[in-house]
Image (cartoon, rainbow, N blue to C red):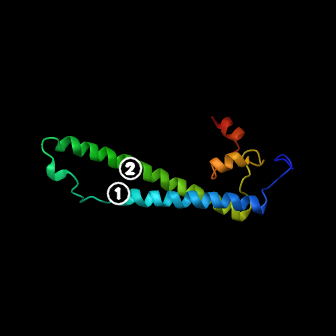
Amino acid sequence: MGNEEKQRYSAEELKEFEDIILKKLEETKAELTYLRETLSKKNDPGTDDTAGNSKVMEDGADTAEKENMNQLAVRQQKFAGNLEKALMRIKNGTYGVCVESGKLISKERLRLVPHTQHSIEAKLKQK
């Protein structure tokens, strides 16, 4: 039974994808918590007490690092949201079906990008 014939993944297959998504979601939320905690440490003295003339340069580097961490936190938040939406698609029976073609997305692609809604063919057409 090839992908061409199937309209949906079986309950067993969906369970495998659900496990993958839940694991990734757990990792993503842990990373997001770490980033938020790191960003909220405003009063952490760190090496500030030992800084001399390089204080201005360190302030600039600190600002750039915080901006990078903030961008990473935003990306992680978006990724977590996409994973949660994928879990909803599993529950409502639409998971693994390409929104462009209506065909099943390959298992290999779903294992690598479990939140995708596009087959590789549809994704390549977008570019």
Tags 1 and 2 touching, CB below 8 Å: yes
Mark 2: which amino acid? Met
Residue 126 in picture, x, y percent from top left: 65, 37
Please tell me in which quadrant of the rendered image residue 12 appears.
Answer: bottom right
Taking the image as shown, residue 76 lies to the left or right of residue 43, namely: right
Residue 38 disc label: 1
Counting other residues with Cα less than 10 Å from the Cα at mark 1, is it few (<14), some (14-19), or many (20 or more)?
some
In this picture, is 22 found above or below 79?
below
Taking the image as shown, residue 70 lies to the left or right of residue 88, namely: left
Mark 1: which amino acid? Thr
Counting other residues with Cα less than 10 Å from the Cα at mark 2, is it few (<14), some (14-19), or many (20 or more)?
some
**Who's the residue at 51% across and 58% down the image?**
27
Quadrant in which the C terminus appears: top right
Location of mark 2 (residue): 69
Earlier in the chain: of badge 1 and badge 2, it is: 1
Circle 2: element type? helix
